[in-house]
Image (cartoon, rainbow, N blue to C red):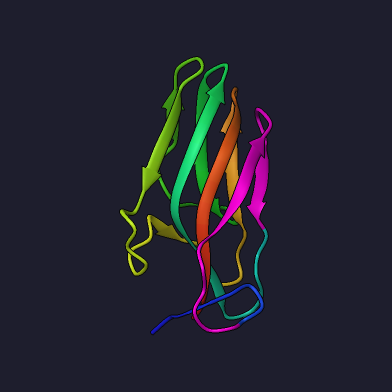
Amino acid sequence: MATLCTRDGRAGSTQQSAAVNAAADATTAIVAAQGAGTQIWVYGYELGVTPGGTYLWKSAATAKQAAVPRGANGGAVRDSGGHRTRPLFKCGTNEALNLTTVTAAVTGDVSYRVVNV
């Protein structure tokens, strides 16, 4: 069973957020890998896409969802409904949360927890 923890390893993690500022046609590390025995669990995100294009969340190099196309000045908001045990997706153990963009620049924020596994 996974144990929720803070970034410094203390039990009882609080939800954290990170800014998203990804250039077009790039893979950007949004949250760095947190060390051996930890995973990043993503609970929500709010993104804006300019001028229009596609983005894809990844755990290191592994896709965590299908590529999401958005129109000019489009965006997306997703959350897990506040369920601590049911994130939208989980990164692999000791893997970074990355965002890959095609054509569009993407800005916004992501909510996550660091979990000991």
Does residue 38 lie above or below 83 as drawn? below
For image coordinates 61% across by 71% down, the residue present is 94
Q: Does residue 18 show up magenta in the picture?
A: yes
Can the viewer see residue 33 in this picture? yes
Does residue 33 lie above or below 56 as drawn? below
The x, y position of residue 80, in whole percent, is: 34, 54
For image coordinates 54% across by 25% down, the residue present is 49
The x, y position of residue 53, in whole percent, is: 52, 22
The x, y position of residue 31, in whole percent, is: 64, 56
For image coordinates 60% across by 22% down, the residue present is 103
Range drawn in magenta: 10-31
For image coordinates 65% across by 65% down, the residue present is 33
Q: Does residue 90 show up magenta in the picture?
A: no
In which quadrant of the rendered image does the N terminus lie?
A: bottom left
Can the viewer see residue 62 in this picture? no
Looking at the image, residue 37 sits to the left or right of residue 22; the answer is left
